[in-house]
């Protein structure tokens, strides 16, 4: 007759095998390593709320990964999964912040509404950059910002679709922004 070992006394490898076999859940491993994961997350995120959220997400993630991955050293593997998860979340957040920052600067009043610009140099840069735009972008920007026309009116005047007008204005703004930053 085999001796039954309490779950808390089992090794990580035994608990993982029991989990894969459906004999146990992951809660013992969670309790064993929650502080390690939380500390690592706190180090990366530098705030408790994000670290708490990350711990939950990580244990949800590892409960799926454990079923398909062969894990030799659970503690090392868990640390690597934790670190990778935190870095990916931080990168994703930075990409979102960069997109918001770029969008805000592309719609900046001082760059794209020359009536509001006090700075002579900015007006000069803007006029030089306007000259460098492709013709349809230049026309669309001119009609939208200088002539104060709407997309629909511009589409009718240039005999193009509303989507094309929007595209020309967006691309024109981006090209102007890039050009002004270079000069």
Image: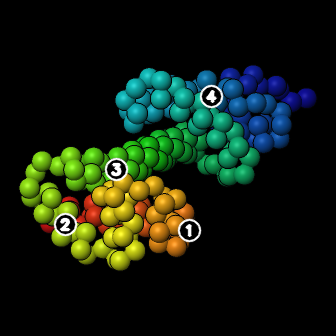
The extreme right residue here reads: 1
Horizontal side of residue 106 vs 69, given as left or right: left
Eye-nearest disc, 4 or 2: 2
Q: Is mark 3 on a helix, strand or loop?
A: loop
Q: Is mark 2 on a helix, strand or loop?
A: helix
Q: Mark 4 points at which residue?
A: 30
Eye-nearest disc, 4 or 1: 1
- Say which mark, if any, is on residue 127: 2
Q: Mark 1 points at which residue?
A: 161
Q: How far apart are marks 1 and 2 (CA)?
A: 26 Å
Q: Are there few (<14), some (14-19), or many (20+) residues within 10 Å of tag 1?
A: some
Q: In this view, does 47 lie above or below 140?
A: above
Q: In which quarter of the image is the C terminus?
A: bottom left
Residue at image coords 83%, 26%: 3
Q: Which of 179 and 121 is in front in this view?
A: 121
Residue at image coords 39%, 66%: 140
Eye-nearest disc, 3 or 4: 3
Horizontal side of residue 87 vs 178, given as left or right: right
Q: Earlier in the sequence, mark 3 or mark 4?
A: 4
Eye-nearest disc, 2 or 3: 2
Mark yes or no: residue 174 visible. Answer: no
Q: Earlier in the sequence, mark 2 or mark 3?
A: 3
Badge 1 vs badge 2, beta-carbon distance below 8 Å: no
């Amino acid at each position: 007759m085999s001796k039954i070992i309490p779950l808390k006394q089992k090794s990580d490898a035994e608990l993982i095998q029991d989990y894969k076999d459906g004999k146990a859940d992951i809660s013992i491993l969670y309790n064993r390593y929650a502080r390690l994961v939380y500390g690592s997350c706190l180090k990366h995120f530098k705030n408790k709320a994000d670290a708490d959220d990350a711990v939950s997400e990580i244990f949800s993630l590892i409960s799926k990964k454990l079923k398909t991955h062969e894990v030799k050293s659970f503690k090392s593997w868990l640390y690597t999964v934790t670190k990778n998860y935190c870095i990916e979340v931080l990168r994703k957040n930075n990409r979102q912040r960069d997109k918001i920052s770029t969008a805000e600067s592309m719609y900046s009043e001082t760059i794209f509404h020359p009536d509001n610009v006090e700075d002579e140099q900015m007006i000069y840069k803007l006029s030089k950059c306007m000259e460098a735009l492709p013709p349809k972008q230049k026309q669309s920007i001119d009609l939208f910002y200088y002539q104060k026309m709407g997309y629909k009116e511009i589409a009718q005047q240039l005999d193009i679709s509303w989507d094309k007008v929007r595209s020309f204005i967006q691309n024109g703004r981006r090209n102007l922004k890039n050009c002004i930053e270079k000069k």
